[in-house]
Amino acid sequence: MTRPTPDPDADVVQRAFDELGRMSFAEHSLESVLQKVTDLAAQVLPGEPVTSVTIIGDGRPATPAASHPLARQLDQAQYAQDAGPCLEAATTGRLVEVVDTGTDERWGAFPKLAAQRGCRSLLSFPLPPQELISGGLNVYARTAAPLDQRSRELAARFAAYAVVPVSNMYLYETAIERAEHLRAALDSRAVIDQAKGILMERYKWPADRAFSALAKLSMESNTKVRDIADHLVQTGELPSA
């Protein structure tokens, strides 16, 4: 019985996946997760690549992480001309490949610029769609040999795996931000209620008139109602308009 030929890089790739899977939300930011993704991709993918991640947010592309300054520079060159393989992959969800940057004529001057900076071929693989996430993993190979089918499969596998911690971290940070906004809103409401109570007791006003007085002073002084209320609670006095 013939045994399958072992893949010499299988253990390296699996260790990279395991490292991504062990990342703790409490110990990392979205930026550090993305940086780990690009660093590991550069280590495990063939072609001596430099790698980056493109994220589309509010219709604008950005490179929050790159394994090498060259990858970031090549991303920025595409953003500047509003066209390029990394933008196409991130916005269309389709794999984009440049086999030879020296001869490819798509995307204006970008392929030749990439060739001049030592990038021989490149692969932009879209991150599988997740809630709130649109982007791609960009692999800029620096060896003469073109990216082969195995390279494409590894990049596809890596992108599919990497999007899970990236998306989860994004959602985690969004939830934390919303919780902080809610806490701030509750704190504001509490101090405004205290200020209203002071005015109601002092002037025998109903609640709506007390709040109207705070709101009127807020508009006249161009100061937040919460700050007006906090001043009253701390000093017992309303600030002058």
Image (tube, rainbow, N blue to C red):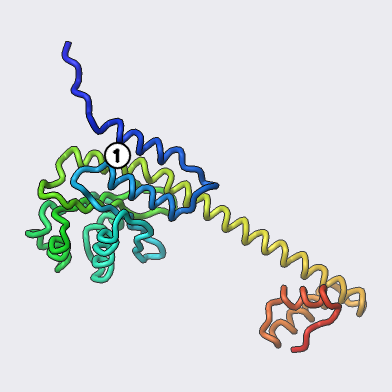
Looking at the image, is 74 positioned above or below residue 36? Answer: below
- Occupied quadrant, residue 220: bottom right
Given residues 31 and 12, the one toward you in this image is 12
Whether residue 194 is visible to the viewer of this picture, yes or no, is yes
In the image, 205: left or right of 62? right
Total labels drawn: 1
As drawn, is 158 to the left or to the right of 153?
Answer: right
Residue 93 in the image, given as x and y percentages of width and height = 29, 51
Report helix, strand or loop for mark 1.
Answer: helix
User: The N terminus lies in which quarter of the figure?
Assistant: top left
Residue 97 is situated, as x and y percent measured from the top left of the image, at 18, 51
Residue 104 x, y percent position in the rendering: 10, 59
Q: Quadrant of the C terminus?
A: bottom right
In the image, 219 versus 145, the foreground residue is: 145
Q: Residue at the far top: name it.
A: 1
Q: Residue at x 40, y 35 (%)?
A: 18
Horizontal relation, residue 20 to residue 156: left or right = right
Q: Can the viewer see residue 107?
A: no
Residue 103: give x, y in percent of width and height. Answer: 7, 59
At 77% from the left and 75% from the top, the residue drawn is 229
Q: Quadrant of residue 57?
A: bottom left
Q: What residue would you read off at disc 1?
A: 157
Q: What residue sits 92% from the left and 74% below the top? A: 201
- Amino acid type for the residue under numbered disc 1: Arg
In the image, residue 120 above or below residue 202: above
Structural crowding at the residue carrying mark 1, measured as other residues with C-alpha within 10 Å and reported as few (<14), some (14–19) or many (≥20): some
